[in-house]
């Protein structure tokens, strides 16, 4: 699984602002800066974890990469092709190689289609020469692959549990043998007992098919388990990016430190002893983010005259370890 | 392990086809079943009218004017001695045809405009909804009256028999707005649902997202508004014909039969009661039918209430 450092996806300075309209004449009065200048690379065959609090823009980042939202600025280069400039049919064609697994397995499957129709849909959309019989066979194979009974193809989604539905969603994402899958919190809506099952399935599929994942989550322990590298987002910006071991061993950004100190340790003695960094206050509004460093309003080490003046550069502090903080040298 | 258990559990559940589910649900809806049976009986009676009556609707018998209901004339006779039962049957042909045609026109218009407007949003939505508002603010009755007048003076070929076609189109063209708004609202909500996003993410075209994913999910409001529209169109036709601007005598419709009876209502009430009753029964039966369809067509209701 060790990556060969071949870049598959390069996100550069990606921005997505949602305009805010107000008044009788629907004048634009501002914008929600959901994603405000995000850059990272994803290497072929790896899993990049993207973590952050609710509303920090991680899902929006995933959807903007997929061009489900039109980016406000920036580029998304996938295997040498800039997706932002792709139009209509070309983009539709490109989607064969980039798939997505959604957060809510109850909302992401059309209640009026059978499981077979749902999983067969990407095949039908992209391969015009394929016959109904062939689709049926491939759907059966896919169901087998995600440990579901092929006979389920004629059933409707409401007849399944959350974990089963999520596996249907995974089968749909795998149908076209994509290179890259954006997993948008694929386990957050599931029971803890089912989460491991789905994560293991994702890992097995990655090994078998050589997939590359962007794994979006807010559960740090699960992300630690599945990711090779992890990016931490705060208020639309990536604060720190490092490989898994480095990030957990020596988090550099104060926000990452705070996040990690919030992860419970399953040992009451250690849990009682350790020092915690507890963040004060709430996440500021993305309509009107703080000047300079976005985290400065809650940062324990923020320095007036430095952190409120300019946005810290996202730089490589150690090989492969990127941090956006003025106080980290 | 867990996976196998789950599999065993759900595969042991009996499998039943969707249409089987549908019928089971629909049958449970007592009023809907009654409604559809009544509607079916009326449709059959009207379609095969000649088999249920020895008379023709135009056959006059001036010696037997204003006969009360009897074994010979089940619904009595009217001012020209024509058999009311026969005229009610033949009139139903026109009234139901107008209803169906007008409903078809308004549902097609309304669904298309609603789907496009809700899905694309933005200026497309603004323009289409503006048009909808304009149509809503047109005083329907007066346009219908004016159109009725124009249609009458145009003297189209086969006017007496076939004149319900333009009339129905006009009624339909003036009654799609409710459907359009309904469909737009549902589409707006569905557009942002994850399964539609999922379809777009996997590369489905706009047309596919609309027809395969959104349309089936707005089918229930469309069906309900179709049945209401059918009932409404029958009433519209009756109203117009009653005012003398719809289908012209001697071609019978339930509306113009009511109109024709105005002067005799007190002396021969049966001439008014029976056409009126027919309109009432048909409209109420169709409404209940629509209710039942709405509940039965939604697969989510099926398991919830199993």
Image (cartoon, grey):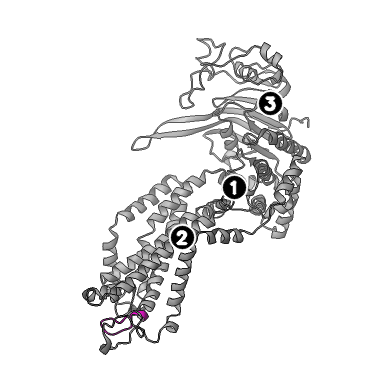
The answer to whether residue A326 is left or right of residue A79 is left
Task: Specify whether residue B154 is in view.
Answer: no
At mark 1, the secondary structure is helix
Q: Label 2 to label 1, Cα distance in Å?
A: 30 Å
Q: Nearer the viewer, mark 1 or mark 3?
A: 3
Residue A221, label in figure:
3
Tell me where residue A191 sits by quadrant.
Answer: top right
Where is the N terminus of chain A found, in terms of image quarters?
top right
Left or right of residue B276: residue A328: right
Q: Residue at x 58, y 19 (%)?
A: A313
- Depth check: A14 or B50 in front? B50
The chain carrying label 2 is B
Residue range highlighted in magenta: B76-85
Judge depth for marks 2 and 3 and give the one in front: 2
Left or right of B19? Residue B64 is: left
Q: Position of residue A189 (x, y in %)?
A: 62, 36
Q: Is residue B276 above or below residue A225?
A: below
Residue at 48%, 45% (x, y): give it.
B189
Graded by Cα atoms within 10 Å as few (under 14), some (14 to 19) or many (20 or more), the crowding at tag 1 reads many
Q: Which residue is nearer to you in this view: B165 or B283?
A: B283
Q: Can you identify the residue that label 1 sits on?
A: B199
Q: Main secondary structure of the magenta part?
A: loop
Check residue B81 for magenta coloring. Answer: yes
Q: CA distance from mark 2 to mark 3?
A: 52 Å
| Position of B270 relative to A162 (above/below) | below
Which mark identifies residue B290? 2
Residue at point 73%, 46% (across, down): B7
Image coords of residue A124 (percent x, y): 65, 54
- Placement of the C terminus of chain A among the 4 image quadrants: top right
Report the chain holding disc 3.
Answer: A
Q: Secondary structure at mark 2?
A: helix
Q: Residue B150 lies in magenta, yes or no?
A: no
């Amino acid at each position: 699984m060790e990556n060969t450092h071949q870049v598959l996806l390069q996100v550069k300075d990606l921005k997505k602002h949602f305009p805010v309209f107000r008044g009788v004449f629907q004048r634009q009065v501002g914008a929600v800066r959901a994603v405000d200048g995000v850059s990272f690379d994803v290497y072929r065959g790896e899993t990049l974890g993207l973590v952050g609090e609710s509303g920090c823009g991680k899902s929006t980042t995933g959807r903007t990469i997929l061009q489900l939202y039109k980016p406000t600025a920036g580029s998304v280069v996938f295997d040498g092709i800039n997706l932002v400039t792709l139009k209509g049919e070309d983009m539709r064609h490109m989607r064969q190689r980039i798939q997505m697994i959604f957060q809510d397995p109850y909302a992401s499957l059309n209640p009026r289609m059978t499981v077979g129709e749902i999983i067969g849909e990407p095949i039908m959309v992209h391969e015009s020469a394929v016959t109904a019989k062939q689709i049926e066979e491939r759907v059966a194979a896919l169901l087998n692959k995600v440990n579901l009974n092929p006979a389920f193809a004629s059933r409707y989604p409401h007849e399944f549990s959350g974990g089963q539905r999520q596996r249907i969603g995974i089968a749909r994402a795998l149908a076209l043998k994509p290179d890259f899958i954006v997993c948008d919190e694929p386990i957050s809506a599931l029971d803890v007992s089912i989460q491991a099952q789905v994560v293991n399935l994702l890992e097995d599929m990655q090994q078998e098919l050589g997939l590359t994942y962007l794994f979006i989550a807010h559960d740090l322990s699960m992300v630690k388990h599945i990711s090779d590298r992890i990016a931490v987002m705060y208020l639309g910006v990536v604060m720190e990016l490092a490989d898994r071991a480095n990030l957990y061993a020596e988090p550099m950004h104060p926000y990452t430190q705070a996040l990690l100190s919030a992860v419970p340790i399953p040992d009451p003695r250690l849990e009682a002893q350790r020092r915690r960094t507890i963040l004060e206050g709430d996440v500021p509004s993305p309509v009107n983010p703080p000047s300079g460093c976005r985290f400065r309003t809650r940062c324990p080490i923020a320095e007036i005259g430095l952190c409120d003046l300019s946005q810290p550069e996202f730089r490589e502090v150690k090989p492969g370890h990127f941090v956006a903080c003025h106080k980290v040298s | 392990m867990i996976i196998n258990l789950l599999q065993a559990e759900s595969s042991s559940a009996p499998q039943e086809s969707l249409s089987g589910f549908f019928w089971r649900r629909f049958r449970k809806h007592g009023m809907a079943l009654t409604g559809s049976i009544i509607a079916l009986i009326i449709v059959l009676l009207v379609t095969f009218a000649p088999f249920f009556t020895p008379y023709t609707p135009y056959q006059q018998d001036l010696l037997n004017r204003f006969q009360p209901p009897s074994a010979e004339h089940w619904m009595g006779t009217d001012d020209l001695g024509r058999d009311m039962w026969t005229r009610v049957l033949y009139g139903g042909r026109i009234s139901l045809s107008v209803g169906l045609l007008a409903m078809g026109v308004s549902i097609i218009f309304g669904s298309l405009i609603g789907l496009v407007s809700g899905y694309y949003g933005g200026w497309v939505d603004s323009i289409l909804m503006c048009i909808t508002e304009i149509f809503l603010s047109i005083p329907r009755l007066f346009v219908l009256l004016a159109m009725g007048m124009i249609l009458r003076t145009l003297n189209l070929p086969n006017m007496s028999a076939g004149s319900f076609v333009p009339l129905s189109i006009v009624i339909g063209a003036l009654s799609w707005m409710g459907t359009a708004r309904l469909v737009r609202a549902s589409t707006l909500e569905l557009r942002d649902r994850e399964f539609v996003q999922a379809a777009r993410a996997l590369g489905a075209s706009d047309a596919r997202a609309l027809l395969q994913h959104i349309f089936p999910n707005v089918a229930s409001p469309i069906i309900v508004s179709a049945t209401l529209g059918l009932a409404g169109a029958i009433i519209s036709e009756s109203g117009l014909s009653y005012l003398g601007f719809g289908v012209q005598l001697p071609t019978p419709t339930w509306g113009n039969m009511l109109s024709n009876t105005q002067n005799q209502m007190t002396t021969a009430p049966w001439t008014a009661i029976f056409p009126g009753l027919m309109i009432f029964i048909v409209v109420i039966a169709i409404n209940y039918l629509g209710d039942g369809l709405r509940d039965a067509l939604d697969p989510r209701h099926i398991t919830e209430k199993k």
